[in-house]
Image: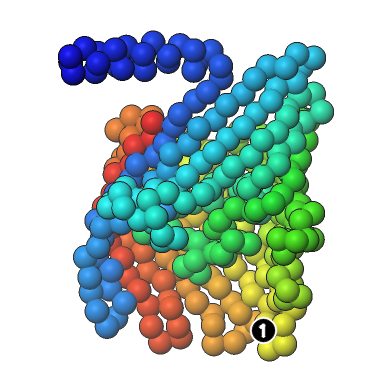
Amino acid sequence: MNKKLIALAAGATFGALPLITSAGVTVYGHAQVEVATVDDGTTSNTVMEDNARGRIGIKASEKLGNGMTAIAKFEFRTDTADNRRTADGGPLTGREAFVGLKGGFGTVQLGNLKSPYKYTGGVKYDPFVATLIQARGANGMSGGKYGHNGFLSDNVGYMLPKMGAFKAWAVASPDESAGTGGDFSVGAIFGQKTWEIVAAIMHNDTNGAEVDSMKIGGMYKFGNFKIVGQFENLSFDAPGTPDTDIYFVGGQAKFGNNVIVAQFGNTDAGGTSADLDYFTVGLIHNLSKRTRLTAGFRSYETSATAETETFALGMRMKF
């Protein structure tokens, strides 16, 4: 009897897959684990980490006619290394979630959204993002929810329709009760497959403590090589908190299934002693379009007298 029940359940599940596909529902995810040695000058430890890359998501769409499509998405972060917790606690934590419409007028999204500041250049310029040798939070790119980490809650987003080489995207929060009212981010890209120029701004007001961020950057491809770079300026409306400039430049060389990467960064907090450097060199070996191996070294200064060095090996699979 148990075997019959299992067979019926399996048949019902797999029989429903065509219906799910025809309904425009897609299930996807990423799995990643790295093994690394981390030396902060005082102690040296071997760690196994997912480093915020593990995720599971569901996307849905429905054709409405008149050129319009309804869209929805839920994406959750999980931890591949231990499958029990994430840095925020619990086995799953929220990432992107929205409902929206797209058509000839562009795309409208409402919910917990990606930041144009984060994804205009930014994390797309770092092939080691969400690994233990990434640039963000390590003097190469700004971290935090209003930099290159996290998502923006209670937001309305709008993306312009395709306009040749120009793309633009904006999000803003009208929700004053949640304390996010007045927050916004805008990003613009002008370019083609081999080159682009990007610019973005971000404004955050938390209980009267305002932070304004801006950046410009670009990408250029020639043959098997790619060069990327960006400059950020963070302005804090708080006494004694100096403006911060962050510089990032990276180079990539592709040979067959391998990509050699070298990246440099610098964070300068208003000419104070917080003038800190970042450096990474590594290799990406693509086993397929969905699976890759990585190996690399990162060094970044945590203060004027201390730095952390990391040697990491990892594997990632997208599905």
Percent of width and height locating residue 34:
28, 53
252 versus 164 height, above or below: below
- Residue depicted at x 75% and y 61%: 177
Asked if residue 102 lies left or right of residue 81, the reply is right
207 versus 82 height, above or below: below
Q: Quadrant of residue 317?
A: top left
Asked if residue 284 lies left or right of residue 228, the reply is left
Percent of width and height locating residue 291:
33, 35
Assign the N terminus to one quadrant of the image.
top left
- Residue depicted at x 51% and y 41%: 75
- Residue depicted at x 36% and y 64%: 298
Q: Amino acid at mark 1?
A: Thr
Q: Quadrant of residue 278?
A: bottom left
Percent of width and height locating residue 73:
58, 35
Name the foreground residue: 195 vs 29.
29
Percent of width and height locating residue 95:
53, 48
Assign the C terminus to one quadrant of the image.
top left
Name the foreground residue: 246 vs 179.
179
- Residue depicted at x 45% and y 11%: 18
Q: Is residue 3 visible?
A: yes
Name the foreground residue: 227 vs 265.
265
Disc 1: which residue: 241
- Badge 1: few (under 14), some or many (20 or more) residues near its Cα, within 10 Å? few
Element under disc 1 = loop
Asked if residue 313 lies left or right of residue 103, the reply is left
Asked if residue 86 lies left or right of residue 184, the reply is left
Q: Is residue 159 visible?
A: no
